[in-house]
Image (cartoon, grey):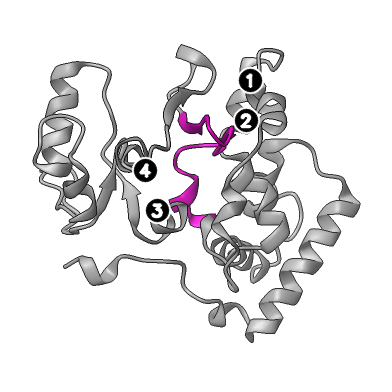
Amino acid sequence: MTEWCRQNLAHSLGAHPDPGLQAIEGEYSWQYRGYPPVSRVIGRTPTTNPDHPDNCVISRTAGLLISALRLLNIPVYCQWLNGNESAHATPWFPSEDLWYSHGDDPYSGNAFATPPYSADNFLIDRTTFESWFGSGVTPEEIQNNVGRQVGFNLVTTYWPDYTLREYCSYWEVGRTGYDNGVYQSLTRYGPISDATWTLYKSQMEQKIIGFGGCDQIPESHRFDEYCN
């Protein structure tokens, strides 16, 4: 299911706390006033919001895991990260006691690498979840840990295509130090020593050279075939 999400889902227009606006956003995303039926997500829908015309007919998500996995008796709960202090949530699979580090992880830019890594890697256990989002973690740390599994752990293990292209955009103009966008993205999750950054740069550059250069890095997953 996580792999299907990676290959097919895209972010919806959001879930506004005001019920009236939430209904309108549902109408824009799924032409349905509320959380969508599974058929509307799987069947793909256009965006009818006049302020966000993307001309794409794609699988926009909201609550899909809860609805679809209920059919298999696999419970899924929406767990808000940092309570009401955060706009971010993640699914919790209580029978497996597993989470994502953010509900958007499976379809983030860094979810796609060449060669691809297993979708199992998105899931984190209770020990990891508690260390990132538990009661003893400050609100600031929790906010910084949102998306950490895909944004840091899997990035520095697999060096996804999106990250390599980001690194290249700076590398080609000689910016490989603290002013590199990848360095700035990774240090959101904590400080990186000079030695570690040197190692990371070497790993990225070796992989880029293995592709044949920056212009040969594969494209991340895209939905062009569903867009006009």
Q: Which amino acid does label 3 sit on?
A: Cys
- Element marked by disc 3: helix
- Element marked by disc 2: helix
Q: Where is residue 205 in the image (x, y as percent from the top left)?
A: 73, 72
Does residue 151 sit above or below 228 in this rendering? Answer: above
Residue under numbered circle 2: 144
**Residue 222 in sight:** yes
- Element marked by disc 1: helix
How far apart are labels 1 and 2 at the CA level? 6 Å
Residue under numbered circle 3: 5
Quadrant of the image containing the C terminus: bottom left
Q: Which amino acid does label 2 sit on?
A: Asn
Tell me, yes or no, whether the highlighted magenta stretch contains residue 111: no
How far apart are labels 4 and 3 at the CA level? 17 Å
- Do the numbered discs 1 and 2 sit on residues whose CB atoms are within 8 Å? yes
Q: Which of marks 4 and 1 is nearer the N terminus?
A: 4
Which label sits on residue 140? 1
**Which segment is the magenta one?**
89-110
Does residue 36 sit above or below 140 in this rendering? Answer: below
Tell me, yes or no, whether the highlighted magenta stretch contains residue 90: yes
Residue count near mark 2 (Cα–Cα under 10 Å), binned few <14, some 14–19, many ≥20 = some
- Do the numbered discs 4 and 3 sit on residues whose CB atoms are within 8 Å? no
Q: Earlier in the sequence, mark 3 or mark 2?
A: 3
**Residue 49 in sight:** no
Residue under numbered circle 4: 72
How far apart are labels 4 and 1 at the CA level? 37 Å
Query: In the orientation shown, which residue stands out farthest toward the front?
Result: 73
- Do the numbered discs 1 and 3 sit on residues whose CB atoms are within 8 Å? no
